[in-house]
Structures are given as C-alpha cells and as structure tokens.
Image (spheres, grey):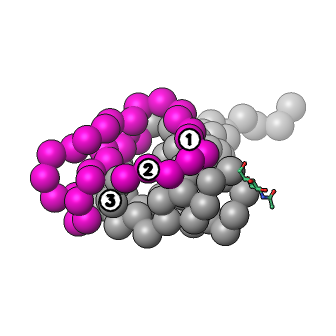
Amino acid sequence: MATYNKNPSSNFVSIAIMALVFVALVSDFANASSITVWSGPGCNSSGQIIRNCGCSDINLRGGYSFIYNGQTAALYNEGGCRGVAHTRLNADARMCSGFGWKSIFIQC
Ligand SMILES: *[C@@H]1O[C@H](CO)[C@@H](O)[C@H](O)[C@H]1NC(C)=O
C-alpha cells in the first residue's frame, strides 16, 4: 500500500479554495451594478454604460436601464452628485424616455 501523506492533498485543497475565492471576486466585480443611458427615446440609439463606483456625470438623458447587482445608486438633478439625491435605485429599473438626472453615485 502506498504511504498516505496528508500535507500534499491539504495544500491542494487550500489552493483550490483560494482559486474559487478569486473567481468569485472577479465575477462579482464583473457583475457590479451598472446603468446604461441613451441619447434618445426608445433605448435604441447610441448609449453609454456607467459602472464606475462613486460619482459619474450623466451626459445622455433620453432613457436609462439600471441593472442591480448589489450596489445601490443615487441619482441627482445636479452634476457632480451635488445637492440632495432625487431617487435611489436598489432594484432593476428602466425607462425609455427622457429624464432629468445629471449625475449618479454608485455605492460599491
Ligand atoms: C427607437 O425608438 C423610438 C421610440 O420608440 C422610435 O421612434 C424609433 O423609430 C426607434 N428607432 C429605431 C432605429 O428602431
């Protein structure tokens, strides 16, 4: 019978767990909340995806689609996320006509 040595297999297990944690972190990052904004009504014109954490100005205001993946977002009627948040999103939301928000803060 071959001698059984515990260490190599427990090393393998901990490396496998580390690899799984890494994959989970990377896919979590790839699935952060994002908002797509469009220049005109219909959500069918040229668009822009915003997925950065923190504050981003919104330059296209013809429609939006927010995909919630765990990070809430606050929308502001002024640029630079100044003033009071007008709307908070903590679920998928979509509207394919004009809106007034000028900036978004994604809380990561
Ligand atoms: C996009 O949607 C708008 C509003 O529904 C519509 O008037 C327009 O024809 C659509 N454009 C295209 C290219 O489908």
> How many numbered marks does the figure carry?
3
Query: What amino acid does circle 1 point to?
Result: Met
Assign a secondary structure to mark 3.
strand
Query: What amino acid does circle 2 point to?
Result: Phe
Disc 3 marks which residue? 103
- The residue drawn where x is 41% and y is 31% is 90
Disc 2 marks which residue? 99
Assign a secondary structure to mark 1.
strand
* Residue nearer the viewer, 53 or 5: 53
Q: Could you tell me which quadrant the N terminus lies in?
A: top right
Residue 95, disc: 1
* Residues drawn in magenta: 71-100
Q: Earlier in the sequence, mark 1 or mark 3?
A: 1
Residue 63 in view in this figure: yes
Gap between marks 2 and 1, in whole Å?
8 Å
- Quadrant of the rendered image holding ligand 1: bottom right
